[in-house]
Image (cartoon, helix red, strand yellow):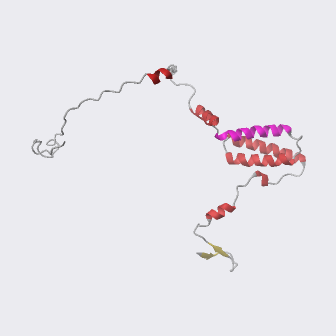
Amino acid sequence: MVRRSQSSNPRSVVVLTSGTDWGTRAAGQRRSSGAESEIPRRQPAKIKALQQAVRLANLAVDKKNWGTARYALSRARALTDALPANVAVREREKLSAVRKRYAARNTPAAKNAKQAKATPAKRASGKKPAPKKSTAKSAAQQPKPAPVRDLGDRFLNRAALGYGSTDETKRPRTR
């Protein structure tokens, strides 16, 4: 389907598609990284930009905003690559600490810490928790299953439910 655009140029045409090309369009687009942004020319400006990137990455990791953290970390990496190795040592140490925190976002230790935060630390009633029993004894000692009660032959009172009489002769036989 083709429609003309609203511009005054009669030759401009906007092609409307049904969305079948979205996959190929998205494949051509890449997630932007901080490395593509402009790097300052002078060294003091580079150091200041590095400090800002490290601060932003730290805040993003604190707030679990992983996309922003990824962007800030790639920007910081580009800035550290543009600086000599002996410059901004403190910022590089901070950056490596943030990288470690970012890398540990999906580890089991991080998930355990999240679960520990979710459970309340103190009970409202003030009671002490019961002491835990050893699992070796409980595994060896199986509880007996409850006996099955014999209910006997029970029949519905069909007459009370409005389905007619309850004569034995009229009831169908079941085996």
Magenta region: 89-106
Q: Quadrant of the N terminus?
A: bottom right
> Relative to 58, is 130 on the left or the right?
left
Rendered location of residue 54, percent (x, y):
78, 42
Q: Is residue 5 visible?
A: no
The prevailing secondary structure element of the residues shown in magenta is helix
Q: Is residue 36 above or below residue 83?
A: below
Q: Is residue 12 magenta?
A: no
Q: Looking at the rendering, in which quadrant would you find the C terminus?
A: top left
User: Residue 43 at x, y = what percent?
Assistant: 89, 47
Q: Of 149 and 71, which appears nearest the observer?
A: 149
The reply to whether residue 94 is in sight is yes
Q: Name the residue: 64% across, 38% down.
A: 107
Q: Is residue 146 above or below residue 58?
A: above
Q: Determine the residue positioned at 72% across, 47% down.
A: 70
Residue at horizontal 68 percent and vertical 39 percent from the top: 104
Task: Name the residue at 76% across, 51% down.
Answer: 34
Answer with left or right where residue 83 lies relative to residue 102. Answer: right
The answer to whether 155 appears left or right of 52 in the picture is: left
